[in-house]
Amino acid sequence: MASSDHHGSIEGDDRTALIVGSGCTGLALAQGLKKAGIKCIVFEKQPSHSPARARDWNMGLHWGAPILQSLVPPSLWSRLDSATVDPHVPTAEANTLHFLNGATGEAMASIPTGKFYRLRRSKLRALLADGLDIRYGHRLADLAYDPDGNTVVAKFDNASPVRGRIVVGADGARSTVRRLLLGDDAAAASSRLPYAATFVHARYPRETALRIRAHHELYIASAHPGNKFAFLGMQDAALPSSPESWTFFGYVSYPLSLAEQDATAHLTNAQHLAHLRRLAADFADPFGTAFAALPADSPVWRVPMTSWDPGAAGHEWDSRGGRATLAGDAAHAMTYQRGQGLNHSLTDAGELCRAIRTFVAASADVEGASAPSSFFSLACPASSSSSSSPSSSSSSPSSAASAPSALASLIAPSPARQPLRSPQRDAIAAYEAEMVARGGEEVRLSITNTTMLHDWAKVMASPVMTKGMRTSTSPATTADEYAEGAAEADGEARRGGSARRDVT
Ligand SMILES: Cc1cc2nc3c(=O)[nH]c(=O)nc-3n(C[C@H](O)[C@H](O)[C@H](O)COP(=O)(O)OP(=O)(O)OC[C@H]3O[C@@H](n4cnc5c(N)ncnc54)[C@H](O)[C@@H]3O)c2cc1C
């Protein structure tokens, strides 16, 4: 699909959305755009979705589930349980996250979580990649904005550039797109926090595996009076009758000053393992047993905690008329002990998908034509009877005839064409306003939560204990409810308003 317009002969055009990053955010957005008939390409710097020695973890999907469901085809949604840590344990309609006192093993709190899909990141990504145009081995290096105001060109370290109508930075907590947008390494860099977590994957002999899992089928958490926090759960239980084949995932998190982080940045696997055993030595079961019995070859890694608050002073970016924006961890990197990052990331995907559909439809209206391209003709299934559909085009030939130049310019933009991108600018601005308020609030709450969970005197007052997994927004409870809200907002936006879900 090389274009040979005035921009030169490079792949892409002003009907393509470019998504940088094939994490869950980028893939969910791509699924939503594909479902809406909007052409998009995902670029991923890794050579595949599961490169050798890639770190993997699992995540709780709860209030964001209806949004994901609204983005993907039913055939994909019906396979979601296959991406859970144990596909043999169907996701219950309601669940509870149990917190133990790490020192005594006594129950501290039981937090209702509603329906709670415990998903392996690698498996979820593999599922969400289904049917998408993903270019692996594409590391974004730079962005260039065409002077006509209509398109953006993504440049890669090791591949040819590609042009699109919008570029979305879904490239994670250390986002390159964020750095390019803010133009200032200091503002774009994540804030370092004085906490770290040491993670491990482990398999155990049959009896040990059964003893650990007897505490909870899927996951369990613990706060320790020594200002530490631990999480333990299944990572992969593909063979129910073979406990020695199960992989467990666990971590202990703890305060660690930035100076200590720097001084110990290059520890070996064996040193991290020894440190983890020491950290966990005074934990009661199941944590005590699980960490003491770690096999010597267990993969261990430490990640200092960071965050990036899109609402902080100096963090505003210029979307270049709606041609570039951020989503997911790239937009709001947060600590994970309240289990919100994925849920917000998928919300971004849902809201951004809606914003793109809105400006695509509005652009078609503004231009007064029904473009025959897949971008415009399929962009808004919810409004397929509108003037943007091919059928309405054929039924009202005069409207197409009355705007031949606009139609032609959509297909082959000319240098003389004035940007008609205010619907795009406005839709992306509305998306960013909601996302920054919602995501920024959660970034700050997550820092508070992490701080309190590592301060025994404050653990019971921490947000995860008092608010559980709930968000401050009013999330939709079903995919239909979410889609209806989106359709209402689409209509409002097309009438010039700015309907949006409230952040309370
Ligand atoms: C231990 C742990 C537990 C968690 N638990 C939960 C939970 O229970 N509930 C919850 O909601 N959230 C949880 N989270 C948070 C959740 O994992 C993240 O919020 C979510 O995965 C973010 O996805 P993303 O797609 O935005 O970013 P990522 O998954 O980081 O994906 C970014 C992608 O962009 C690619 N990329 C980066 N730079 C470039 C470039 N220059 N060019 C091309 N590609 C690039 C990367 O290779 C990567 O594939 C947890 C996180 C951790 C670490």
Image (cartoon, rainbow, N blue to C red):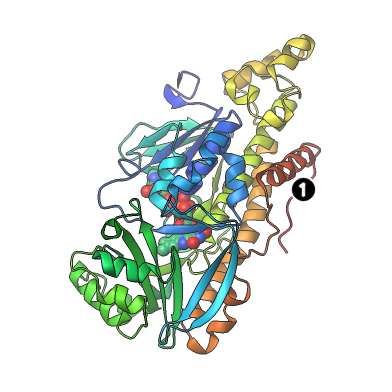
Numbered disc 1: secondary structure? loop
Instruction: Mark 1: give few (<14), some (14-19) or many (20+) Cα within 10 Å.
Output: some
**Quarter of the image with the C terminus in it:** bottom right
Vertically, is 343 above or below 287? above
Disc 1 designates what residue? Answer: 499
Q: In the rendered view, does 460 fall on the left or right side of 240?
A: right
| Residue 205 occupies quadrant | bottom left
Vertically, is 500 above or below 310? above
Vertically, is 407 above or below 206? above
Q: Where is residue 444 in the image (x, y as percent from the top left)?
A: 57, 70
The residue that appears at 74% across and 27% down in the rendered structure is 365
Q: Is residue 58 or residue 418 the one in the foreground? A: 58
**Quarter of the image with the N terminus in it:** top left
| Residue 233 occupies quadrant | bottom left
Do we see residue 146 in this rendering? Answer: no
Disc 1 residue type?
Answer: Ala
Q: Is residue 446 or residue 16 the one in the foreground? A: 446
Q: Is mark 1 within 8 Å of ligand 1?
A: no
Q: Which quarter holds ligand 1? A: bottom left
The residue that appears at 63% across and 72% down in the rendered structure is 467
Q: Where is residue 79 in the image (x, y as percent from the top left)?
A: 49, 41
Q: Is residue 166 or residue 61 the one in the foreground? A: 61
Vertically, is 447 above or below 363? below
The residue that appears at 62% across and 41% down in the rendered structure is 70
